[in-house]
Image (cartoon, rainbow, N blue to C red):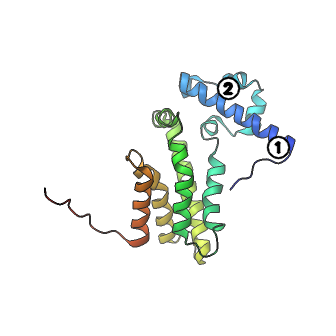
Amino acid sequence: MTMPPAGRRDRKKAATRQAIADAALHLFLEHGYDQVSIRDIADAADVSTATVFKHFSGKEALVFDQDEDREAQLTAAVRQRPSGQSILDALRQHVQDTWPSIEAHPQAAEFTNLVNSTPVLRAYAERMWTRYTDSLSAAIADEFGVDHDNLTCVALARFVLEIPMLARGRQDRRTAVDAIFDILTHGWKPPSKPPAQ
């Protein structure tokens, strides 16, 4: 898990970074991704364009400003789990601890629509997703001392990363997440028909 910046300088850098990301998202949601320039974002955040590029590699990275933190937290869930906790239990806890707050964010639907309706952002999200899969499967593989391209580790990483999307829209998302992790933990069982009335 990432720790909050300790020193004054680090806190100031983090605040500037957040202000830039917030300004960018506001402008993207209001005007559309393609209609907003880096200059527009810099002006809205009251910084120079050089400062924007000091904090972000490009325009797409402004949309996914927490990308690196989320990837680090995902692998930390495996690598830094308590002794005796299984990988699946650690990942279940991580998803339950992080995903509901993301989904409950008041701008979640607008953000999803922005990404889905903008080809360059969809492509960026897919590359990010692939990187998450690689990082998580490598962390899992390391725990078992197998190669990073081990198919079972890659498959597990991919399945875990799909869980939030599979549970999205369900009335009780937490229960849906648990149900999917139960399948991964205990194996799939055919659903039973509801009793006839």
Mark 1: give few (<14), some (14-19) or many (20+) Cα within 10 Å. Answer: few
Residue 35 placed where, x, y %? 56, 22
Residue 105 placed where, x, y %? 54, 38
> Does 164 appear above or below 33?
below
At x 37% / y 46%, what residue is drawn? Answer: 171
Kind of residue at badge 1: Asp
| Residue at image mark 2 | 41
What kind of element bears circle 2? helix
Kind of residue at badge 2: Ile
At x 80% / y 41%, what residue is drawn? Answer: 11
| Residue at image mark 1 | 10
- Camera-side residue: 164 or 126? 164
Q: For residue 175, what is the image quadrant? A: bottom left
Residue 52 placed where, x, y %? 73, 32
> Does 123 appear above or below 75?
above
Q: Relative to 97, is 117 on the left or the right?
A: left
Extreme residue toward the right, this view: 8
